[in-house]
Every structure is written in structure tokens, then in C-alpha cells.
Image (cartoon, rainbow, N blue to C red):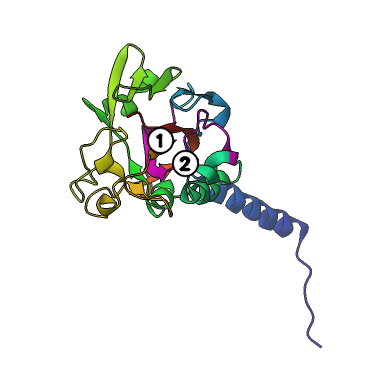
Amino acid sequence: MKKYRRMSKYKFVVFVWFVVKFAVFFTACGIEDFPVLPPIPQSNVTMELNNRATVRIPNDYTGTPFTNFAIFYRIYVSDMPQSSTSSESIFLTINPTLDADYKAFKSYIDSTTAINVDMDRLFQNRGYKYLDLQPNDNILSSSSVFGTNLVFDFSSYRDPTMRAGSSEYTLWRSDGGGLFSPRPDRLFRNREELYRSENIDPTINADVVGKTGVADGSRIYTYAAMFIVAVGVNTASYSNIYSTPALIHVFQLPD
């Protein structure tokens, strides 16, 4: 019968030491260390009626892979005016697609488990586009907005704007980098060419979704749902990473 020699106490200690060193080494290498961007908490957003919202930007992005904020939006046609749009219970009334879209994003808002979800793909797969700011978008990539407020104003009879500090920016619809041509223009205004059914097309108003039963010629309203995320770069893979989103508001577009 073959005999086995018992491992000496010294060899056992050395073996355990190597196991511990390997564990420390792999932990230090960051195998489980993923860069994460803190989200804007939903509690940092104050919605007013159907036309104003204030987003309080956190002050804790320094030292993170942050590059900019991005705002996703989609426009919904409706036959229902709403004086207040801050409750998700009325989204179905406004437009069933708005309700379905919001439910697709809801689980990510203030989530403590969703990490580095590709929010770009998630939003664009549901027809959302990137908001543009005029004269430029530089404010969304500036650290000067940390700890400040972004104020969105869709008041009647004016072009919707976003104010950051003392600067005001006009909100512009996307043209998909030239992939489609918004009509009548890129402003967020409730006009016939915006909601006319023949213009709700991937080559024209690709940022607009209609509502079944709403006929051209009837009194039509339009609403823009907007979400904000923080964007950064994973320096290991050079790919974009995203925070989870916060709903800015569902704004009724002014005439």
C-alpha cells in the first residue's frame, strides 16, 4: 500500500501564504473594480405644472470618469391637455407609448443595482434622441455646472430654454446628425408640421410618435419627455459608461 507523507507545518504555512497573496493580487488588479458614475437622484428634480423643471446637479463628479451630461427626449402627440404632468398616472392618458416608454425606464431610476447599463442603447431603441442646446452644448461637459441648478422653461408663447447660472440656452430638437430633417424646424413648439401624421416619419420627424385615434385637423397637443444621465469613459476599454437616468419632466410644448 502506498504511503502518503503529511505536509509539514512549515510547508502548510507557506501554501496558505501564497493563497492569500494571490487573492490580494487579483483584488488589487481590479477584476471587480468597475468605474461607476453617480446618478442624479430623482429627488434632485423639481417639476412644476406642465412647463417647468429644476434639476439640482450633484457636486460629486470630481475624480470620476465623467465627461458630460446628456439629455434624451421624445415627443408624443396627444388629444388631451394636462395642466400638470408630474404624475406617472396620467402618462397613459397623454399617450400609451409614453406610458410604455416610461415603464421601460422606471426600474433604472434611483436603482442601486443597475451599474453601467448602456443607457444610450436603451433610450435610442425606444426612439429617444439627444437634445441639442444652442448656441452650443459645452455647458453639459463643463464642471462649472457641478452643484448648480439647470432650469427648464416651456412657458407659453416662447421658445423653450434651459438656464444654467446666468446663461440661457435654446432647446433644439435632434436631426440625428443629418439623418432626418425635423419640420417645421428644430424648436420645441406645438405646430401642425410637427404633429401632422405624414411627417411622423424616420426621415422627417423621427423624434415624434403619434397617437391612435388622433386625426389631423383636430385640436392636438404635444409633450416632450426628457431624461438626464451622466456620461463618462471607461479608460480600460475606451467605451462610454452611463449613470442611471432621472426624469426631468414631461413638458407640454407651447403653441
Question: What label does residue 35 carry, if any?
Answer: 2
What amino acid type should be assigned to the residue bearing mark 2? Pro
**Residue placed under numbered mark 1 in the picture:** 65
Q: Is residue 231 left or right of residue 16?
A: left
Q: Is residue 155 magenta?
A: no
Residue 41, position in %: x, y? 55, 30
What amino acid type should be assigned to the residue bearing mark 1? Pro
Q: Is residue 72 magenta?
A: yes
CA neighbours of label 1 inside 10 A, class few (<14), some (14 to 19), many (20+): some
Callout 1 secondary element:
loop
CB under 8 Å between callouts 1 and 2? yes
Q: Which residue is depicted at the point 31% across and 22% down?
A: 157
Q: Quadrant of the N terminus?
A: bottom right
Q: Indicate which disc, 1 or 2, sits on the residue closer to the N terminus.
A: 2
Q: Residue furthest right?
A: 1
Q: Which residue is depicted at the point 50% across and 50% down?
A: 96
Q: Residue furthest front?
A: 217
Between 239 and 144, which is closer to the camera in this rendering? 144
Between 17 and 52, which is closer to the camera in this rendering? 52
Question: What label does residue 166 carry, if any?
Answer: none
Q: Which residue is depicted at the point 50% across and 33% down?
A: 82
Callout 2 secondary element:
loop
Q: Is residue 214 left or right of residue 26?
A: left
Q: How many marks?
A: 2
Residue 240, position in %: x, y? 37, 45
Q: Residue furthest bottom?
A: 1
- Whether residue 9 can be seen here: yes
CA neighbours of label 2 inside 10 A, class few (<14), some (14 to 19), many (20+): some
Quadrant of the rendered image containing residue 172: top left
The span picked out in magenta is 62-89
Q: CA distance from mark 1 to mark 2?
A: 7 Å
